[in-house]
Image (cartoon, rainbow, N blue to C red):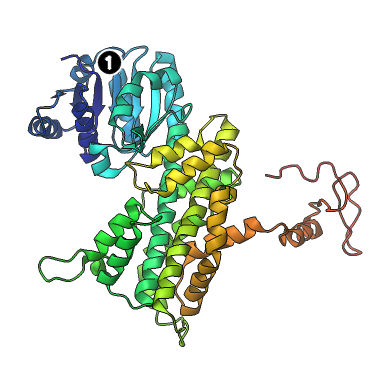
Amino acid sequence: MSCDIGLWGLAVMGQNFALNMASHGFSVVVGNRSPAKVTTTVERAKAEGDLPLVGSTDVQDFCSQLSKPRKVVILVQAGKPVDETIAKLTEFMEEGDIIIDGGNEWYPNTVRRSEELKPKGIHFIGMGISGGEEGARNGPSLMPGGPKEAYDAIEPIITKCAAHVGDNEACTGYCGPIGAGNYVKMVHNGIEYGDMQLISEVYDLMRKVLKMSNDEMAKVFEEWNSTELNSYLIEITYKILAKKDETDGTHIVDYVLDKTGMKGTGRWTVQEAAEQSVAAPTIAASLDTRYISARKDERVKAANILEGPIQLPTVDKEQVLTDLKNALYCSKIVSYAQGMNIIRAASDKKEWGVDLAQCALMWRGGCIIRADLLGKIQNAFTTNPDLPNLMVDPAFAAELNSRHMAWRRIVGLGVASGIGCPTLCTSLTYYDQYRRESLPANLVQAQRDFFGGHTYERVDKEGTFHTAWTDAHKDLGDLSGRTAGNV
């Protein structure tokens, strides 16, 4: 069999994506460092409909079974294993062939690998894949970036294999040149961090302030999933809260240790936000919360030392639930606004030409952050590709304006109850800072001029200015170079 595409790396994601491609009629050859996983995948293909999938015995055999130009997806652990896999594969590949890395890779590594492969004439694509094991098998969100001619060669395959929404729109598309696909996936994961933390803070207020049971909370989240909050993460939340241990009938979530792990993509997103000078406090707060959660032993000790409120506020349960729903929705809008602004800033700087409406479409199905909200986001950026911030889109502005008082009540309730709600709180702060014509930054800039002669601009006249704030300050003379180095 001369296969349409190959897949190397057969952990569960790799197996499922290979079976996905075969299910759509593409002939697939699979390979892996350990032969046992090749055998397992071939057996699965046979059992799941005698799919057009074959196994290979080694790298040379794997490459020999591919039609030209060869197209190979690799799904191995990010970092050194990717470099090692590329080195092995390229021994048996030639000019015009295409390698697609589907892992969660730091985008500068993808750019480096692309440059390293150019002398051999081998195209390299970095393609973010989101959707977990289920998405990989049944239709994930696919975010490819690389040479356009290489994308065009794989487009028929990935378009068929991606998730589809609405009028059969594929949740994939060309993100841009090399690095753009990994970047979009990185920010997707950063938004995912924020979304998960926002939901967990709402859960915390429900159980600690409203004293709701897991079953009660599950019912509320299930109801919310049929509203504007409909999303994959809300769906799995109510399923998690309702799940009981079959042996004793207790809720499993109560026995899960409160330490959140991470793979690093959230940290990369926050680093990139800083690099691009884009405020992303919701995503940053969600990352900080994971750091704090990891210090479990310290928190256990601190609980016996540090005090919180003794007199807790009296609340109206139904009002609080309504407010929680509105606060969560507003915060999600803000989180997406921050993520989109990171992508836009990097795209402008690197001249990638990333289409934010296309990003929203890619995320509408198959991926972890899929949500009804993304349809509205797609519409917003389709209507106005130059929209400076999602919050000022007329439809979203109306939503925020009608709900922000509920948002404020929830943040105040958390503070008064001693329940930390960092992402709900910082999302509101971001909204309040962005909507204000005047901020106290004038004082900060005056302080910088006082101690460092950093100068300032004035609101009443053009130019650069410095003040001798005390007798100890001297005239700085020419101020033209004083702002050099500003970011």
Considering the image in quadrants, where does the C terminus appear?
A: top right
Tell me if residue 358 can be seen: yes
Instruction: Residue 126: give x, y in percent of width and height.
Output: 40, 30
| Left or right: residue 316 compared with residue 406 | left
Figure disc tally: 1
Residue at the extreme bottom of the image, as rendered? 311
Instruction: Residue 291: give x, y in percent of width and height.
Output: 42, 60
| Left or right: residue 248 compared with residue 125 | left
The quarter of the picture where residue 122 lies is: top left
Residue drawn 53% across the image and 49% down it: 337
The quarter of the picture where residue 225 lies is: bottom left
| Left or right: residue 456 compared with residue 285 | right
Instruction: Residue 299: give x, y in percent of width and height.
Output: 39, 72
Q: Amino acid at mark 1?
A: Phe
Up the image or down, 64 lies above or below 206; here it is above
Label 1, on which residue?
Answer: 92
Tell me if residue 183 can be seen: no
